[in-house]
Image (cartoon, rainbow, N blue to C red):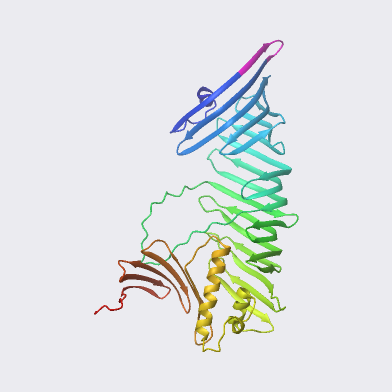
Amino acid sequence: LATLLESLGVQKQKDLSYEASIDAKTIIKFEKKLLVKTDIEIPSYDLKIDSQNFSGEDNHLEFLYTQNRLTLENYTIDLQDRHFYATKSSIFSIDTDRKKIILEKFYLFDDILLQGDFNYTTQELELFVKSDKFYYSGKEASLDAALDLHLKIDKDKNQTITGKVELLDGEIYYVPQKDYTISDPDIVIIQEFKQQQLHKRSIDIEVVAKQPLKYKVKDLEMMVLPQLSLRQKPDESLLLYGRLLIQNGEYKLGDKLFSFAQSEINFDGEVPINPQLDIRVHHQTLDYREIEIYITNTMDDPVILFSSNPPMSQEDILSYILFGESASSVFDTSGGSSTSLNMLLLGTGLKELVNNNSQIHVDTLNILTSEEGSLGYEVGARFNKNIRLIYKSDEVSSVILQYSLSRNVRFDVDVAQTGQGVSIIYIKDLGDPL
């Protein structure tokens, strides 16, 4: 294998190690033409190239060689817990100048056809990828899609990928992962980062759908129509443009049902991805009050607006969302209970609802109200007996890190939009003479 790669001019990897179990059976016939038939079984393999590891089990390949043409009659390859296979024959040949390997046809999953050539003297590659319909199944989606892509790599290793991906039908289960950071010039986070690897790559791929696709995760189901494009310039990040049209959908929060009206999520090429939101949600209470929720601004910093018919206060709208009744009905104010107490109880109900219906566990979640009637919130979680983190959004947003030195002494590090500070708090015990 090493001799073959060397003869094709493929550069040897700096760090290459492998271990594999291989069973091969070869039949050679000398008649009017040479015929070589080979069956290869690879029960297991472990390959390391530079810092990347590849492994798999139960691999099978069946080859037939005659008249300078190599036919891969069928194959099954296990790569990183994914099975690649084809029962259709794939054909390779070498041009008359013996400079190019010609990919006459290569099948992937029987439904994807690859055609092109590879010049092993200049390392140039041109590849066309086509499929009228193929099925993809993974933990992030189950989809039927059509492909029409063109890949080209020149002798200077510049890569160009263009074309179209059309999603025909299916379901998406992908849950976006988010990295939370604090962008403050006075805060230094010491962390080891790998140097970003730059690529001479240009990408222009359109991702569209003929009909809405089902997006389904825990408690959320909606029909979305993607109109997206992936673009990248050499040595720059991959950018996402376009929009997701939400046709309809439902979200269940406890025993409450919220329905989506036609909405949009717009992507404008930000890095990291931070789409603009234009989402409209409707909720009808048991006594037929209509509550409208409008989510705007960005995913990183959403703005949520409430309205109702008949008109209600923000306090009553939140109470209906949580308890199905107005705040005055849920909380008895005849004994002198204040609005602040009502909001505290609302926060307690919201905390219980969040803990019961999501993977987030919080020990503090309060609704805050000002004299002008504006609303805010406070959410906190304890990591261990000494450390608790609280996020507060009121007139300004702030993050408070509480660290307890002892039962009586605590440090509070407060980082807000307007500045930051450190407080030392002494908690007096009853009977303490200090």
Identify the image quadrant of residue 263: bottom right
Vertical order, 295 against 237 (above or below)? below
Residue drawn at 42 percent across, 66 percent down? 389
Quadrant of the snapshot with the C terminus: bottom left
Is any atom of residue 95 visible in this view? Answer: no
Pinpoint residue 223: horizontal percent, then vertical percent.
71, 60
Residue most extreme to the top: 31
Pinpoint residue 302: horizontal percent, then vertical percent.
56, 70
The answer to which of 11 and 408 lies nearer the viewer is 408
Per the rendered image, the range of residues in magenta is: 25-34
Is any atom of residue 386 visible in this view? Answer: yes
Q: Which SS does the magenta portion mostly show? A: strand
Pinpoint residue 83: horizontal percent, then vertical percent.
62, 37
Residue drawn at 72 percent across, 11 percent down? 32
> Does 28 appear in magenta?
yes
Residue most extreme to the left: 433
The answer to which of 90 and 225 lies nearer the viewer is 225
Pinpoint residue 363: horizontal percent, then vertical percent.
47, 68
Residue drawn at 67 percent across, 76 percent down? 292
On screen, residue 348 versus residue 38, left or right, reads: left
> Does 97 appear in magenta?
no
